[in-house]
Image: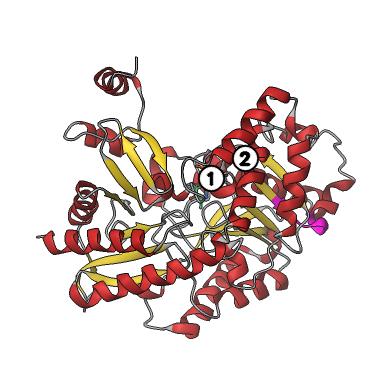
């Protein structure tokens, strides 16, 4: 049954891939990955690849083939596979405790299965608080251009990559977009902290336009991931925090990508000294060994629900598999691995090495207009012209990705089908990466850029 030809045939005939892959299916052979060790994966034809994007979408933070996680999950499944998880489970309690230790100021963990679901929970909390404490008026949720929060209708309503979302409308009301904070594409020519403060002030303008007493929360990625690795400029977060405090607006940070060590601290917001009210996380929580996500909040926010007039309100939020035992078991082992192998420090060290390498490639390749990132999370924005910053055409960006793939290195790229959104190469290797692997990635990109032609 695992005969490659038959598997590929079944895959072609029946699996509903994402649409870009279907487009590729007509012309090429999408990989079916069958095995992984560390940072290496093998496809169904036996070809080896170095994975520079941790499972395609920056998920497998601790790398492939972790028997320790698999063993713990197996033991748990045999002992107690499932009993309405959120009601209380040994793994759930132990993982919550370990997690909260890494998040000073926060205290309550809600379990779900995906990043989208964790964000849904956060959005629902904002609406609940609005009803209970503000007569239903403070229910608007602000989201940022280029940010992404998931696949559900509410998450798409909060999606800052609007041109892709249009087909799913009509959207959930009372989601309002604020401008992005990509310095490289700042429209008013400002730079550094001047731009950072200005970009945050643009949020305040939206709040004032909408009416501060109608805005319940501001939802932001700490570093915009799929929208092009946008590290907010200096001055931005201080001002954002100040604005949230001034207008009594909850700050919801979406750590689905940055959480659990990706940028070199446990959470991305910790790089900037931010104090969030709500934090959501998913991918790296169990590095893909189990499906688990969390929505974490402060005791102060949690208190707002304590005397809920509808005692069933939270019960209606308990999803069947949220906190299912295998999730927190895998998450706890994942967290121990990050800690024992000092992978956060490695992310910082190797991330700096990766960015240095990409910056050096700029000297050789005029196609790279900007390099940015934090920890093992980096982007290289490709341009047709450095002076005008005209984005490189998507076809050429994809040619670079395909060239790397032929060399056996899997990298990513933003793909937004709109100029200015589809030209950033993405790198997010597992946090175990060493110099040798980074060198291999850089060499592949170097070679690929050298071969790109108009
Ligand atoms: N938030 C961010 C920042 C993400 O990148 C993603 C997934 N790409 C999500 C939320 C949604 O997570 P999931 O796919 O697990 O629903």
Residue 449, image quadrant: bottom left
Mark 2 touches mark 1? (CB < 8 Å): yes
Residue 107 visible in this rendered orientation of the protein: yes
- For the residue pair 24 and 244, the one nearer the viewer reads as 24
Residue 13, image quadrant: top left
The part of the chain drawn in magenta is 296-301
- Label 1: how many Cα within 10 Å (few below 14, some 14–19, many 20+): many
Residue 206, given in percent of the width and then of the height, sits at: 56, 67
Residue 175, given in percent of the width and then of the height, sits at: 56, 52
Q: Residue at x 48, y 47 (%)?
A: 59
- For the residue pair 8 and 280, the one nearer the viewer reads as 8
Q: Residue at x 71, y 62 (%)?
A: 213
Left or right of residue 91, residue 308 in this image: right
Looking at the image, tell me whether mark 2 or mark 1 is earlier in sequence order. 1
> Which label number is shown at residue 330?
2
The N terminus: image quadrant: top left
> Which label number is shown at residue 287?
1
């Amino acid at each position: 049954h695992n005969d490659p030809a038959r598997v590929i045939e079944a895959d072609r005939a029946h699996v509903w891939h994402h649409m870009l892959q279907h487009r590729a299916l007509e012309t090429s052979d999408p990989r079916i990955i069958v095995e992984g060790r560390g940072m290496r994966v093998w496809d169904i034809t036996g070809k080896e690849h170095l994975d520079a994007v941790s499972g395609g979408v920056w998920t497998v933070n601790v790398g492939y083939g972790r028997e320790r996680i698999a063993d713990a999950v197996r033991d748990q499944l045999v002992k107690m596979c499932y009993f309405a998880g959120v009601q209380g489970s040994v793994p759930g309690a132990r993982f919550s405790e370990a997690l909260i230790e890494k998040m000073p100021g926060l205290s309550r963990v809600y379990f779900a299965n995906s990043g989208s679901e964790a964000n849904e929970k956060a959005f629902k909390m904002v609406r609940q608080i609005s009803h209970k404490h503000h007569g239903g008026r403070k229910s608007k949720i602000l989201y940022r251009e280029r940010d992404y929060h998931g696949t559900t209708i509410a998450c798409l309503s909060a999606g800052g990559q609007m041109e892709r979302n249009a087909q799913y409308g009509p959207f959930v009301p009372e989601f309002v977009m604020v401008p992005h904070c990509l310095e490289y594409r700042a429209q008013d020519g400002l730079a550094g902290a001047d731009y950072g403060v200005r970009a945050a002030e643009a949020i305040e303008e939206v709040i004032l336009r909408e009416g501060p007493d109608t805005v319940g929360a501001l939802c932001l990625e700490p570093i915009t991931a799929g929208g092009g690795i946008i590290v907010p400029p200096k001055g931005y977060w201080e001002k954002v925090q100040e604005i949230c405090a001034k207008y009594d607006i909850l700050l919801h940070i979406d750590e689905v990508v940055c959480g659990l060590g990706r940028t070199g601290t446990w959470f991305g917001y910790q790089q900037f000294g931010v104090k969030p009210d709500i934090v959501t996380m998913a991918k790296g929580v169990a590095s893909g060994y189990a499906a688990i996500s969390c929505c974490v909040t402060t005791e102060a926010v949690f208190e707002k629900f304590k005397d809920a007039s509808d005692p069933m309100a939270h019960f209606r939020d308990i999803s069947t598999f949220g906190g299912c035992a295998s999730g927190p078991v895998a998450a706890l082992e994942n967290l121990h691995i990050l800690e024992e192998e000092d992978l956060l420090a490695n992310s910082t060290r190797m991330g700096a090495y990766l960015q240095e390498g990409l910056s050096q490639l700029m000297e050789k390749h005029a196609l790279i207009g900007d390099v940015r990132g934090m920890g093992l999370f980096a982007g290289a924005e490709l341009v047709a012209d450095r002076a005008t910053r005209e984005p490189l055409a998507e076809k050429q960006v994809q040619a670079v990705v395909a060239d790397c793939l032929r060399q056996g290195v899997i990298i990513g790229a933003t793909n937004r089908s709109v100029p200015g959104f589809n030209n950033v190469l993405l790198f997010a290797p597992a946090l175990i990466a060493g110099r040798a692997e980074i060198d291999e990635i850089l060499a592949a990109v170097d070679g690929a850029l050298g071969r790109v032609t108009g």
